[in-house]
Amino acid sequence: MIELHDLALDAPDGRLLVQGLDLALPRGGNLLLTGPSGAGKSRLLKVIAGIERPARGTVLVGGHPVWPGDGVLALAGKVRLGFAFASGGLLSNLTLRENLALPLRFQGTPAAEARQRTEAALERLDLLAVAELRPHAVSASARRHGNLARVLAMEPDLILLDDPMEGLDAADRAIALELLQTWTADHACTLVIAAEEPHAFTHLEVARLQLSPVPMESP
């Protein structure tokens, strides 16, 4: 599902984050990206998703060339991609329910099926009570769960999650972890999680890849 060849990533300030990365993750595989803040975990997710360009290297998703190429446009209509950002990601002018339903409309999902999938995802993430509220009117935990619920409703082929447990209390973590366990057991989807604190994912059956900051060159 994901193939990376000689990948190099840089930060907005030009600092090199990752260099010479090779990776092959098969369809249905599960991967946990770990490493300290600034090691390039979030950047790597965005490069795989095709929304940010690498400094060098090749990215293929589902056999389709993302980089070099047209980025996320290369996956349109070919790979269903679900991405939950570490912060934000929900449209502020839509309710949580509308946020979940919007990608399904873009996919051309029949209205009855879209409603069923939206309601099921809201219930799974314990969001029905706040479904008619906009993101700014709900808690940070509810916004994080809203991002996960939107991914769930999409039934994607590839799921990219950026620190999905960060800031959640024990009860909310349990809800999120149960969903992640379901995804890891689903051989129809491929899951990549980026997290600075890997201990939260101890019970998940995932391969692990630790990213380390590239040492600064001496002047």
Image: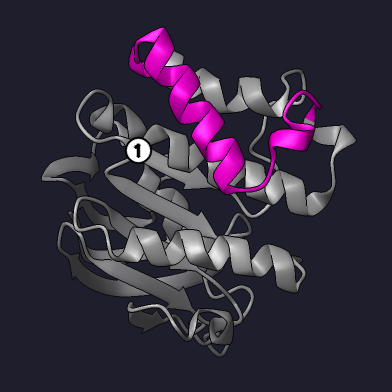
Classify 113 as above or below 73: above
The amino acid type of the residue labelled 1 equals: Glu
Residue bounds of the magenta highlight: 106-134
Confirm whether residue 164 shows in the render: no
Quadrant of the frame with the N terminus: bottom left
The residue shown at (70%, 42%) is 88
Q: Is residue 47 magenta?
A: no
- Residue 137: x, y in percent? 88, 34
Can you identify the residue that label 1 sits on? 155
Quadrant of the frame with the C terminus: bottom right
Of 11 and 157, nearer the camera is 157
> In the rendered view, does 61 fall on the left or right side of 158?
left
The residue shown at (40%, 78%) is 204
| Quadrant of residue 29 within the rendered picture | bottom left
> In the rendered view, does 159 fall on the left or right side of 198?
left
> In the rendered view, does 66 fall on the left or right side of 179?
left
